Image (cartoon, grey):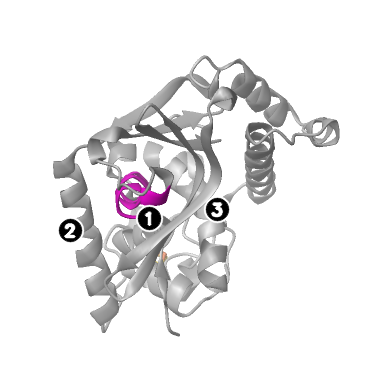
Amino acid sequence: MQLNTLSQSSLQDYVDCARRFQLRYLDRLSYPAIESEPALENEKHQQEGEYFHRLAQQHLIGILSEQTTKLANTANLQRWWENFLNSKDLSGLRELTGLHAEATLSAPLGKFRLLAKYDLIAIENGKATIYDWKTYRKRPRNEWLSARMQTRVYRALLVSAGAHLNNGQPFEPEQIEMIYWFADFPNEPARFAYTSAQYKRDWDLLTKLADEIASASSHPLTDDRQKCAYCPYRSYCERGVRAGAIDQADPQGETEAEELFDVNFEQIGEIEF
Ligand code: SF4
């Protein structure tokens, strides 16, 4: 099947396992196996995460209704929402005029379009801050976050495709910062500034990956079998039928499992484009 767009999720899959990329984005196979146990609990956590994103968006654009807040009635949602409203790092956001909640940016990348949807881009005094809300059960290490495709794609794409948010002038990388805000660790946000050298490095890597993807004639299985423990395509690869229990995986693997469980906007965007 013809693939027209790339996103941080599809690029992360490609980097993690070319076979997973093929099954998910080229063959468009839906999940044949539950990704991690216990399945119901993970599904609930995922739904709560989606709901939390909706609350945050409605709050930021000033249309949060009492009705929506009332529906935030699980223990997780109540705690996350309280943390959000009480966060010193997020206080004052709503007063900013340059607030772009759930903004979508895209730019050509090789034969593809690179697409990203941002939870929030806040612009103030020539500085652009990318916010991403995370409802992870564990606070990932900064080194792990820094290497994620999301961190690279979101900052690089704002430089390449964000001029309309900056009076027609492309942002300099040095004007950009990305903040992951963790709903369960509200006082431990992860901040990533940006430099021109990092932008060049990121865009070169993204271009190389896009070229590789466009010309790939095979999609080998990853050698890192840890990645298979919670991968939904295990049965296609004969790498186990039962889902791995995520707390048996390595510490960052647990977070990767949570990300895999998310069917996020970008995948929907890729199908619609
Ligand atoms: S089971 Fe392993 S080899 Fe197969 S797609 Fe998933 S990560 Fe890749």
Q: Which residue is mark 2?
A: 204
User: Looking at the image, which is closer to me, 181 or 48?
Assistant: 181
Q: Which residues are magenta?
A: 150-164
Judged by depth in the image, the label closer to the viewer, 3 or 2, is 2
- Badge 2 amino acid: Asp
SS majority, magenta:
helix
Q: Is residue 184 visible?
A: no
Q: Which class describes the residues within 10 Å of circle 1: few (<14), some (14-19), or many (20+)?
A: some
Q: Mark 3 to mark 1: distance in Å?
A: 13 Å
Q: Which residue is mark 1?
A: 227
User: Looking at the image, which is closer to me, 18 or 266?
Assistant: 266
Q: In terms of secondary structure, where does tag 1 sit?
A: helix
Position of residue 3 in the picture relative to residue 142 (left or right): right
Q: Mark 3 to mark 2: distance in Å?
A: 29 Å
Tell me the residue at 79%/31% (across/down). 69
Q: Mark 1 to mark 2: distance in Å?
A: 26 Å
**Which quadrant of the rendered structure holds the N terminus?**
bottom left
